[in-house]
């Protein structure tokens, strides 16, 4: 009779489902850290970067032409009396501005590669070689194993819902990181056009400043994503919340799983909002 009643206990099946889902989440997190610590130059074997290198000379050629145009626009807008402007200091200042604009147009990708490498190393230091993993508490696992049929049925429904949410969140996590790489790769060639405005006056060169701020924001976004994942995983592994002291063991486990679901969703929300957090934190 006892052996027959054990058939209706679903604790082992629930634990197997949760462990499988948590393993999936940990794999996604490990993949995310691996990608965040990677330079766009090497992303996907460098295939995407090869496209950027192929089109970059076109943007450099257009940017070099625009440097002269913006220089003339800036000179004309700032000049009131051309004889007064033709002093040695004014000519030297304009030539330096023109030379800097041309140098940034031609070498902006080299500068960006240095930023990519620095941010990747930063993320790898944060990860410390291995990210914090998601796992169910041993005490809660014992409670799930010893559940009766009715309680285990409720737990199975909740575990199934948790599994669906974690799987969806895992895919959203990967999507967000992929989308960041896409944004970086798309804005890299545009740097030549943006830096060409440095040849103009202050009003025109504001475009280059705006581009730099956005580029830095997208770069540092990787650090914010890594921090969000580390902190949220620490929330998940912290155990039961303080208000569960007076509840039954199986109810505590339900609350624990609900909190884990909430923290996983919070992780994805923090990662998706990393750009906004970064721009506000650094004033970019």
Image: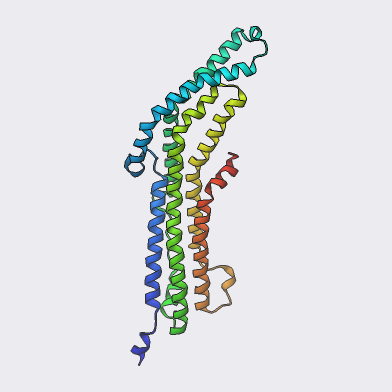
Which residue extends farthest right? 80
| The C terminus, quarter of image | top right
Residue 224, how many percent across, how many down?
51, 47
| The N terminus, quarter of image | bottom left
User: What is the count of numbered marks?
Assistant: 0
Q: Nearer the viewer, residue 2 or 178?
A: 178
Res 8 quadrant in image: bottom left
Report the residue at 55% width, 44% height from top: 278
Residue 81, how many percent across, how many down?
67, 10
Q: Is residue 258 left or right of residue 178?
A: right
Does 248 sit above or below residue 42?
Answer: below
Residue 149, how many percent across, how many down?
43, 84
Does 137 sit above or below residue 225?
Answer: below
Q: Is residue 284 left or right of residue 222?
A: right
Report the residue at 57% width, 26% height from top: 205
Q: Can you see residue 147?
A: yes
Does 120 sit above or below residue 78?
Answer: below
Does 222 sit above or below residue 19?
Answer: above
Q: Can you see residue 118?
A: no
Report the residue at 47% width, 21% height from top: 65
What's the coloring here?
A: rainbow
Residue 262, how many percent across, how many down?
52, 64
Q: Is residue 82 left or right of residue 66?
A: right
Q: Nearer the viewer, residue 96 or 11?
A: 96
Res 26 quadrant in image: bottom left
């Amino acid at each position: 009779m006892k052996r027959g009643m054990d058939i209706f206990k679903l604790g082992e099946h629930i634990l197997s489902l949760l462990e499988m889902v948590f393993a999936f989440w940990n794999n996604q997190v490990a993949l995310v850290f691996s990608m965040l610590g990677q330079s766009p130059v090497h992303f996907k074997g460098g295939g995407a970067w090869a496209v950027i290198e192929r089109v970059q000379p076109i943007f450099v050629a257009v940017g070099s032409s625009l440097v002269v145009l913006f220089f003339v626009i800036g000179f004309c807008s700032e000049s009131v009396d051309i004889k007064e402007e033709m002093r040695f200091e004014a000519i030297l200042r304009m030539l330096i501005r023109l030379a800097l604009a041309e140098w940034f147009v031609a070498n902006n990708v080299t500068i960006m590669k240095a930023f990519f490498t620095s941010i990747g190393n930063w993320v790898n230091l944060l990860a410390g070689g291995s990210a914090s993993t998601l796992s169910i508490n041993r005490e809660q696992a014992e409670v799930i194993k010893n559940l009766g049929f009715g309680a285990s049925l409720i737990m199975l429904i909740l575990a199934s819902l948790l599994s669906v949410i974690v799987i969806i969140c895992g895919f959203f996590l990967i999507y967000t990181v992929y989308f960041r790489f896409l944004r970086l790769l798309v804005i890299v060639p545009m740097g030549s056009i943006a830096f060409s405005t440095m040849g103009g006056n202050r009003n025109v060169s504001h475009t280059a400043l705006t581009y730099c701020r956005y580029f830095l924001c997208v770069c540092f976004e990787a650090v914010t994503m890594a921090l969000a994942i580390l902190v949220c995983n620490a929330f998940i592994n912290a155990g039961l919340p303080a208000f569960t002291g007076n509840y039954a063991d199986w109810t505590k486990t339900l609350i624990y799983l609900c909190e884990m679901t909430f923290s996983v969703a919070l992780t994805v929300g923090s990662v998706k909002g990393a750009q906004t957090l970064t721009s506000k934190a650094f004033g970019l």
